[in-house]
Image (cartoon, rainbow, N blue to C red):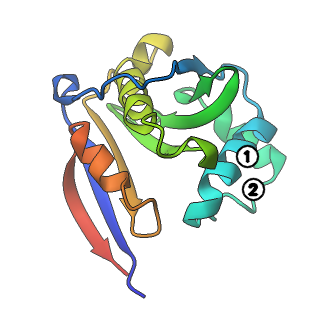
Amino acid sequence: MTLTTWYFEMRDRTELAAARAPAERVDLVRAEMPSPAFSRFLYTTVGGEWNWTDRLPWTEAQWREYLERPGVETWVGYVRGTPAGFAELDGTSPGEVELAYFGLLPGFIGRGIGGHLLSEGIARAWTLSERWPGLEAPQRVWGHTCTDDSPVALGNYQKRGFKVYKTEES
């Protein structure tokens, strides 16, 4: 089966088309203390349904090394104290922030939370350098998704204002 990967970007924060707020309150909180166990939980729980495998072999030390890099942030959406989804930002490349991972935990899919959480994550990407003195302000926020991901993923990214700049098939 052919795997299609779409790379998308936003070149200006004014391009962000925020989704409407969901019916239930979602609190977005930055996980400021690197926690390999918590990040692995988010990655495996969200990505389990979508064939996320690249980080499965990571050791605790590899997770910690990644999470402690200046400019890496994990933002978690909570509904009534329960993790509902996350956005992982990687601002370690000068002038850009990668939306490295984004997704919802299975029990929160289809509840109108995804667009809102993505909007809030993108907004945090544009302000990442304000929290990390010495990092260059982003000129671009980017990410990628593929046919192994949720069938609504690409549409959600495009509705938020991202433009596809490259497509690959393998």
Residue 131 lies, in percent from the top left, at 49, 12
Q: Residue 169: image x %, image y %?
A: 32, 78
62 horizontally vs 92: left or right: right
Q: Residue at x 73, y 21 (%)?
A: 33
Q: CA distance from mark 1 to mark 2?
A: 9 Å
- Compare residues 129 and 54 and report the one nearer the observer: 54
What residue is drawn where x is 39% and y is 27%? 125
- Figure quadrant of the N terminus: bottom left
Please report contact status of discs 1 and 2: CB closer than 8 Å, yes or no.
Answer: yes
**What amino acid is found at the position of numbered circle 1 in the picture?**
Arg
Q: Which structural element holds mark 1?
A: helix
* Marker disc for residue 40: 1
Please give left or right for residue 141 compared with residue 55 in the image. Answer: left
Q: Nearer the viewer, residue 111 or 6?
A: 111
The residue that mark 2 highlights is: 58
48 sits left or right of 11 in the view? right
User: Circle 2: is it few (<14), some (14-19), or many (20+) Cα within 10 Å?
Assistant: few
* Residue 85 coordinates in the image, percent (x, y): 57, 37
Q: Is residue 4 above or below residue 27?
A: below
| Disc on res. 156 | none
Question: Mark 2 falls on what kind of element?
Answer: loop
* Residue drawn at 32 percent across, 43 percent down: 142
Q: Is residue 81 left or right of residue 122?
A: right
* 94 lies above or below 151: above
Percent across and percent down for residue 6 are 30, 61
